[in-house]
């Protein structure tokens, strides 16, 4: 329940950047993202350091799919990160990243955590 309230606040932009939410997101990241996303880009996935506010598919050291590259004109805003994690293949048809985060509260936490990655 608390997490749901937090998620709603976070989505409203009131709590994004909240340390508690980001700490939740760090746990989710360890479990669900870290196998493919490290501090540096690997063939498994691009680095997410500084991803918030960056151009979509914007790194030169990772070979993105045509699906995600088609979105390259846009920026990773909170809303775009949320939409991609909610349904990667819907946000960017043909993206190589198959799994997202179905639970909205967990997703808000994951987005808050990504904003701490510099
Ligand atoms: C099985 C490997 C894998 C897992 C697990 C994974 N990703 Fe990804 N992710 C990728 C790949 C591969 C891409 C590049 C997709 C493409 O080129 O279409 C990507 C791209 C991204 C991008 C866009 C990066 C950019 O530079 O534009 C974000 C944001 C992202 N992932 C977040 C996450 C989060 C958050 C999680 C955990 C909830 C996660 N990913 C889990 C493989 C993975």
Image (spheres, helix red, strand yellow):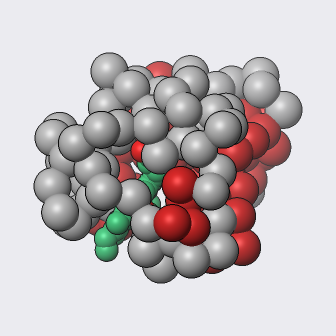
Q: In which quarter of the image is residue 97?
A: bottom left
Vertical placement of residue 5 versus 106, above or below: above
Asked whether 68 or 25 is in front, the reply is 68
Q: Answer with the quarter of the image where residue 26 lies.
A: top left
Q: Position of residue 57 (x, y in %)?
A: 47, 46
Q: Quadrant of residue 42?
A: bottom left
Q: Please indicate whether residue 21 sits to the left or right of residue 44 in the image.
A: right
> Residue at coordinates 27% horizontally, 50% vertically from top-left?
62
The image position of residue 31, as x and y in percent, is 29, 64
Question: Taking the image as drawn, is residue 54 in sight?
Answer: yes
Q: In which quarter of the image is the C terminus?
A: top left
Residue 36 in the figure: left or right of residue 110:
left
Residue 2: in sight, yes or no? Answer: no
Report the side of 86 relative to 56 (left or right). right
Ligand 1 lies in quarter: bottom left
Q: In this view, does 75 lie above or below 97?
A: above
* 10 or 90, nearer to the observer: 90
Residue at 17% from the left image edge and 63% from the top image edge: 43
> Toward the viewer: 20 or 101?
101
Reply above or below: 13 against 80: above
Q: Residue at horizontal 57%, vertical 77%?
A: 94
Q: Where is residue 72 in the image (x, y as percent from the top left)?
A: 59, 44
**Count of labels in the image:** 0
């Amino acid at each position: 329940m608390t997490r749901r309230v937090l998620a709603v606040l976070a989505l409203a932009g009131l709590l994004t950047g909240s340390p508690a939410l980001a700490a939740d997101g760090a746990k989710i990241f360890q479990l669900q993202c870290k196998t493919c996303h490290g501090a540096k880009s690997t063939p498994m996935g691009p680095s997410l350091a500084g991803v918030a506010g960056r151009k979509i598919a914007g790194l030169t050291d990772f070979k993105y799919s045509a699906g995600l590259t088609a979105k390259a004109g846009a920026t990773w805003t909170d809303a775009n990160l949320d939409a991609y994690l909610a349904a990667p293949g819907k946000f960017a048809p043909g993206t190589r990243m198959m799994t997202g985060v179905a639970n909205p509260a967990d997703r808000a936490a994951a987005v808050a955590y990504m904003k701490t990655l510099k």
